[in-house]
Image (cartoon, rainbow, N blue to C red):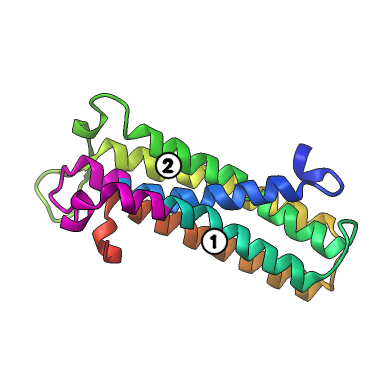
Amino acid sequence: MGLWGRANAGTGAGRFIGVLLALLVVLAPIQYWDTDAHGVRPEWFGSHRTLFLSAAMLLGAALPLFLFWTRARLLQSSANNPTQDLFWRKVLAWGPLVTAGFVCYQLAYFPGIKDMQVALGFHPLEAAGPNAVWVPLLDVLRCAILMAGLLTTFGVNWKISSGFGVGGAGNKLKGHRMSLLSATAYAAVLLVLMTKPQWLGF
């Protein structure tokens, strides 16, 4: 598993992944507002854009670092402790998901992609002919890429959980389930922030 299979696999790399996860959440609605294609950009964003961007980027970088520092203090263990090593490997397992997220973020800058749509067709039994729903191509690609990143993160997480001898089988299963639920929730929130941030009150 490369980086994920190494002993003491990267406290610094784990912190870097955490910062990227937070920054992506900050950048997604900002990108949506910057286009202003849907007329949902808040008035305060236009008048205080520089101040808001500076504060948001600072918070996005500082918050995960503070949380990781708090976690390290709670563990109060050396870098060789299996529990701490497992924690950082699980953070690194989010690497494929955050990579997929940044790919989705950059897709919005592809020329003309926001004007492209795809037809999703279906044929109800009682209808005379097929029906079609037109969906933005960008949204379809983002769903597919995020799903690929999420499934890869699932696989890496499962491999990490299976290979570690920390805790009993019940604790391992519970920890793995929580990791999967957290990753799924993050991917869902990220997708909404990129496509419909007003659903979350932005």
Residue occupying the far top of the picture: 111
In this rendering, position of residue 9 left or right of residue 114: right
Q: Quadrant of residue 63?
A: bottom right
Q: Main secondary structure of the magenta part?
A: helix
Q: Does the magenta segment cover residue 178?
A: no
Given the image, on which type of amino acid does mark 1 rest?
A: Leu
Q: Residue under circle 1?
A: 63
Quarter of the image with the N terminus is: top right
Where's residue 114, x and y in %? Answer: 23, 34
In the picture, the disc for residue 144 is: 2
Q: Label for residue 107?
A: none
The percent coordinates of residue 200 (x first, y second) are 30, 65
Left or right relative to 118: residue 171: right
Residue nearest the viewer, comparing 136 with 186: 186
Crowding near pointer 2: few (<14 within 10 Å), some, many (20+)?
A: few
Picture residue at 54% right of the left edge, 47% below the top? 20
